[in-house]
Image (tube, rainbow, N blue to C red):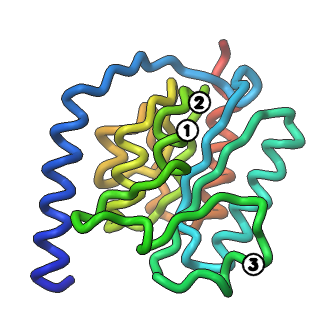
Amino acid sequence: MSLIKDIQEGLGRFKLKREQKHLQRKAKAFSLEGATTVGVLYNATNRAEAETVKNFIQYLKEERKEVVSLGYIASKEVSEQINPILSYTFFDQNDLSKNMVPKGSDVTNFINKPFSILIDLNIKNDCFPLEYISSLSLAKFKVGANGTYRDNDCDLTIDISENKKVEYLIIQIKYYLKMIKN
């Protein structure tokens, strides 16, 4: 990362820490069965991973869940990538402020929606825009892979060190969320 990008992200992290102090959220564990609304946050830069997430979202809808997804594409030119999957919400580098903070109504609505479960499918350790959204989300129960910001912000983290793929994370999330009784 360049020095300028490091400074911009540092300013974004400062803003995130300030906003986290005002965050009021009551955590409550939800099973997949007991959840009514599910937020899915993911990195949509990789086309194959985005397709896997799309299939997972379809699965959740078949389970009669209200699903809102938000994907981040680490590019300024997304038109080629988005066209085939227009029914999903995305944001890209054009939607970031100078301090790397995501902006826009889709992002604000996602952060402020009190999902039963937020599923953070980001497996990259250096994606500040997704970290920002996940950290400030008002979801009641946050689930994601272990590591970095997710260790502090998620209520349930899953170890994927033996297989660092989105497919594996989704399988593990389904398994553990079905084990919860509420």
Disc 3: which residue: 83
Foreground residue among 165 and 41: 41
Mark 2: secondary structure: loop
State how far apart marks 1 and 2 are (Cα).
6 Å
- Give the alpha-carbon distance from disc 1 to disc 3, as whole Å: 25 Å
Q: Earlier in the sequence, mark 3 or mark 2?
A: 3
Q: Nearer the viewer, residue 147 or 54?
A: 54
Residue marked by disc 1: 118
Instruction: Name the residue type under label 1.
Output: Leu
- Residue 128 visible somewhere in the drawing: yes
Percent across and percent down for residue 7 are 11, 70
Residue in the image at 14% along x and 59% along y: 11
Q: Residues within 10 Å of mark 3 (few under 14, many from 20)?
A: few
Secondary element under disc 1, as helix, strand or loop, is: strand
Dot 2 crowding, Cα within 10 Å, few <14, some 14–19, many 20+: many
N-term-proximal mark, 1 vs 3? 3
User: Relative to residue 74, is residue 89 drawn left or right?
Assistant: right
User: In what quadrant of the picture does the C terminus appear?
Assistant: top right
Q: Name the residue located 18 percent from the left edge and 42 percent from the top edge.
A: 17
Are the residues at dot 1 and dot 2 in contact (C-beta closer than 8 Å)? yes
> Which mark's residue is nearer the viewer, 1 or 2?
2
How far is mark 3 from mark 2, CA to CA? 27 Å
Residue sitting at the far top: 182
Q: Disc 2 marks which residue?
A: 115
Provide residue 141's location: percent of width, then percent of height: 51, 28
Q: Position of residue 55 (x, y in %)?
A: 79, 60
On screen, 99 above or below 65? below
Is residue 8 toward the left or the right of residue 24 in the image? left
